[in-house]
Image (cartoon, helix red, strand yellow):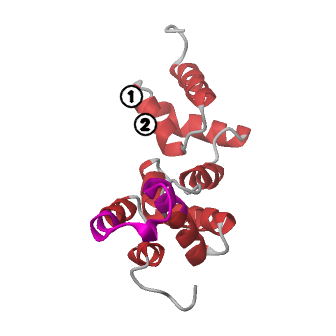
Amino acid sequence: MSDAPPLARAKNLALRYLAARARTEAQVRARLARAELAAQADEVVAWLVRLGYLDDAAYARARAGALVAPGRLGPRLAVRRLRAAGIEGERARAAVAAAIAHAGEGTARGEVALCRALAERRARGDPGALDDRARRRLARFLLGRGFSASAVAQVLGIFEDSSA
């Protein structure tokens, strides 16, 4: 295939790259650039979009759902991961909010429910039964996984929110 025109090589490479799993436009462009086919990227991406093989919005929705599944990541880290994959900020935030709302009873309560699921899995039971040192450690872990401080505080019983 090395004697094929650059556009044909770029299309072939992009199709093989997408065959493994769904990708974003930015990921396809980066892969073409690594293969020194960046000049063909615009045409190849437009072709893939027309065929329906490349859809950043669908990728964001599917990936956000997987990232914020119960016991996985919080919304902040999920948005960061989507942004790293090439999804623009507002689309990433909307996809994560929709995934959380779908997983729970709305964005705020959904985040608390997801945080609680991860805390219970990590604590191997009720996180409220932990001593202070273990609770602080668990709080750092949950914050690092992208949950908001208010969700972590509610789950660990640091304060009670009357609206929850």
Residue at (57% x, 55% y) in the render: 64
Residue 67 seen in the figure: yes
Magenta-drawn segment: 117-136
Name the residue tied to disc 1.
Answer: 34
Residue at (35% x, 59% y) in the render: 141
The answer to whether the residues at label 1 and label 2 have Cβ atoms under 8 Å apart is yes
Label 2: element kind: helix
* Relative to 154, residue 80 above or below: above
The dominant secondary structure in magenta is helix
CA gap, disc 1 and disc 2: 6 Å
Name the residue tied to disc 2.
Answer: 30
Residue placed farthest to the right in the image?
51
Q: Nearer the viewer, residue 160 or 97?
A: 160
Q: Is 145 left or right of 69, judged from the image as shown?
A: left
Quarter of the figure with residue 157: bottom left
Disc 1 residue crowd, few under 14, some 14–19, many 20+, Cα 10 Å: few
Three-letter amino acid code of the residue under disc 1: Arg
Q: Residue 41 location, x and y as percent?
A: 50, 35
Quarter of the figure with residue 130: bottom left
* Relative to 118, residue 12 above or below: above
Q: Is residue 22 magenta?
A: no
